[in-house]
Image (cartoon, helix red, strand yellow):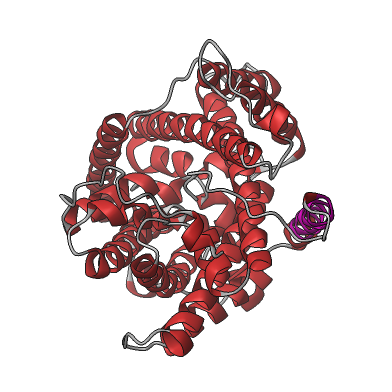
Amino acid sequence: MTIAQDIKSPASAPQLKRTLKLWHLIVYGIIIVQPTAPMGIYGVVSNVARGHVVTTILIAMVAMLFTAVSYGRMARVYPSAGSAYTYVGSELNRLAGYVVGWSMLMDYLLNPIICAVWCSAAARNILPSIPYAAWAVSFVLLFTLLNLRGVQASGNVNAILAIGMSMVVVVLFAYSVRYLAFIARPIGGQWLTPFYDPTTFSPSRLFQGTSIAVLTYIGFDGISTMSEEVENPRRNIMLGTVFTCLFIGIISAIEVYIAQLAWPYHGPFSDSIVDTAYVHVAMRIGGKFLFHLINATLLIANMGSGIAAQFGAARLLYGMGRDNALPRKFFGSLSIKTAIPRNNVLLIGACTMLGVFLLTYEQGAELLNFGAFIAFMGVNAAALIHYKFRSKEKVRLALIAPLAGLLVSAFIWLNLGRNAQILGTAWIVVGLVLYWLRRNKSKPDGTLAEPQDSGIPA
């Protein structure tokens, strides 16, 4: 039995209506990724890449565009799945799919941690007298308590938030034009310094910075989950994914280009402001008004992301527990009163509480990208195998596009920080040990029991 067969619905089940057009997908993708995506990681990437943030964003965009093509193409093959785990497990093998799924679980666990870290740093910009530890504990408790009550951000709230962030970006651009035209007044080669500065350029630092800058695009693959509701999914899923990456890449490059012109790199940001460096750049551009506007916008956005990420992690663990991939008694249970996976929410809350004191924003972001790039490499490999060697359908660049995505993704993945590589590898080893234990426990003959579909989006 293949994974694809596992997830098929009965013929009599209600079918979703195909009402979404291409532009709906693009708007949905922008809402997921957020138009302010590079602002949170700006200071970290600037320190690592020695100021070449624009270049890292553009290099990351190339990798994501190739990968977006592979996601779009695989959504044709598995239109109701929308999961890197499904694509890899079906086209390569179940073990490879498991590794991808286990890596994505690490992403789910890390996301609320880095959101809580960033929110704590942003809150200190407002009330610096309150220590980081107090803010960190408060945000983790807030995320956990809201999820215990079943509070989730709806699609409408996310859409309103995305519109609000877009308006803030427009205000930022207006202030930036005034600042650059009348105060900074770059001349000659200064306009190109954000792309390449020979005095600080280092290829190794550039690619390490790129491995973090990819966080800007995380979430674009969520478009593939809309396959059953979009008109002409064979065409529009791929186009929607590619256009979303392209739009986010261009708008993000403009945002960081403005910041680098306003605050040229003369050394790394200090530890006290590195996580919220973009907010401090905004103060230089537009004074306290823009400082507080950007700070509040990003704080609200990260709070929403942290709450949603924690719920997503709890839901993923519930699905794995329900399928007995994890102990069902603990992970697969729901609260009688709220129908919330209470055990999982509390466990994720405890992990988040521990993580905010053990990890910096940079370390968390690199670890998150460790898992994300394993999924990206897997999807590119699955697209290559399917369309080059198995499918009768002819597509353009069946070999070159996924191979380029695979190689670029692997190159960026290998340039992650050393600590991220060590900790990420340790996580994979733990996952493989659990896989081996389950395989030898599930059946008398030593074969792994086929899990049911958990319905958990990846």
Viewer-closest of 424 and 3: 3
Give x and y (percent) for residue 322.
61, 36
Q: Residue 300 colored magenta?
A: no
Choose between 297 and 310: the one closer to the eye.
310
Q: Is residue 430 a member of the stretch shown in magenta? A: yes
Q: Residue at x 32, y 85 (%)?
A: 393
Q: From which residue to which does the magenta span run? A: 424-441
From the viewer's perspective, tell me whether residue 315 is left or right of residue 245: right
- Residue 48: image quadrant is bottom right
Q: At 65% across and 55% down in the image, what residue appears?
A: 103
Residue 124 seen in the figure? yes
Q: Is residue 267 among the parts visible in the rendering? A: no
Main secondary structure type of the part rendered in magenta:
helix
Residue drawn at the location 59% of the way across and 31% of the way down:
116
Q: Position of residue 409 (x, y in %)?
A: 55, 73
Q: Quadrant of residue 143?
A: top right
Q: Residue at x 38, y 69 (%)?
A: 77
Does residue 206 lie above or below 385 as drawn?
above
Q: Is residue 433 left or right of residue 66?
A: right
Q: Nearer the viewer, residue 338 or 417?
A: 338
Q: Is residue 137 above or below residue 261?
A: above
- Give the percent coordinates (x, y) of residue 386: 46, 80
> Residue placed farthest to the top in the image?
337
Q: In the shown orientation, is residue 304 left or right of residue 159?
A: right
